[in-house]
Amino acid sequence: MNWIVKNFLRGLVIILPIALTIYLFYEAFVRLDRLLPLKVPGAGLAILIVLTVLVGALASNFFVRKFLQLADLIFTRAPIVRLIYAAIRDLLEAFVGDQKRFNQPVAVLLIDGVRAIGFMTQDDLGFLSMPGQVAVYLPFSYSVAGGLVVVPSSRVERLPIDSASVMALVISGGVSRVAGTSVDMIAPL
C-alpha cells in the first residue's frame, strides 16, 4: 500500500504541473481567440497579436502619440476610471515598459536576522518628505499580490541576481532554485 501511495504522489508531482500549464495556455488561447469570433481557430488571436504590434509601432508616430497622450489625460482625470486605468498601466509599465520597476531585487532586514526578499521600486522617497527611505515591493508567495514597505536605505541590500529568478523564488515560496547563483552570493548586511 505504501508503494502505491508513494508512486501516486510522485506521478502527481510530474503530471499536475504539465497538465495545469497546458490547460492554462489552452484557456488563454481560447479566450483570446473568442474576442474576435472567426471561423478559423487561431485567426482571432493572430489578428489581436498583429493589431497589438501595429499599435505599438504606430505609437512612435507624432500624431498617434499626441492622441495617446490625450487619451491618457482623459483616463487619468476621470474619477473612478483613473483608479483602474492607472493601476493597470503602472503595473504593465513596471514589468514590460520603458521604466521597469521590478528590475532591482533586494533583501530587506526586517528584524535581527530576519530578511524579506523583494524589489526596490523607489530608491528615494524625498518627494514624500521621507529622505533616506526607499520603497520595496514584497510579493506574496503563490499569489499575484504583495505589500509595499518603506524602510531606511541602510536596511536594504541589492542582490546580484536577475529579477526573473528572484520573482520565481519568492512566488514559489522559496521552493524554486535560482539558476547560476549560490548562497554565498547573498552576503549578510
Image: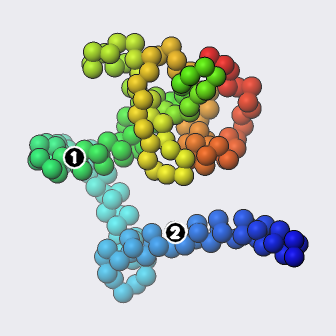
Whether residue 90 is situated above or below residue 48 in the rendered picture: above
Q: Quadrant of residue 147?
A: top left
Q: Is residue 31 visible?
A: yes
Look at 36% across and 46% down and name the residue there.
Answer: 92
Residue 180 located left or right of residue 46: right
Q: Which residue is mark 2?
A: 24
Q: Earlier in the sequence, mark 2 or mark 1?
A: 2
Dot 2 amino acid type: Leu
Residue drawn at x 58%, y 66% is 21
Q: How many marks?
A: 2
- In this rendering, which labeled residue sits more in front, label 2 or label 1? 1
State the image coordinates of residue 48 (x, y, percent, origin top left). Answer: 34, 67
List x then y, in percent, for residue 56: 31, 51
- In the rendered view, would you say 16 is above or below 117? below
Q: Secondary structure at mark 1?
A: helix
CA gap, disc 2 to disc 1?
28 Å
Image quadrant assignment for residue 49 = bottom left
Q: Residue at x 37, y 34 (%)?
A: 99
Looking at the rendered structure, the kind of residue marked 1 is Leu
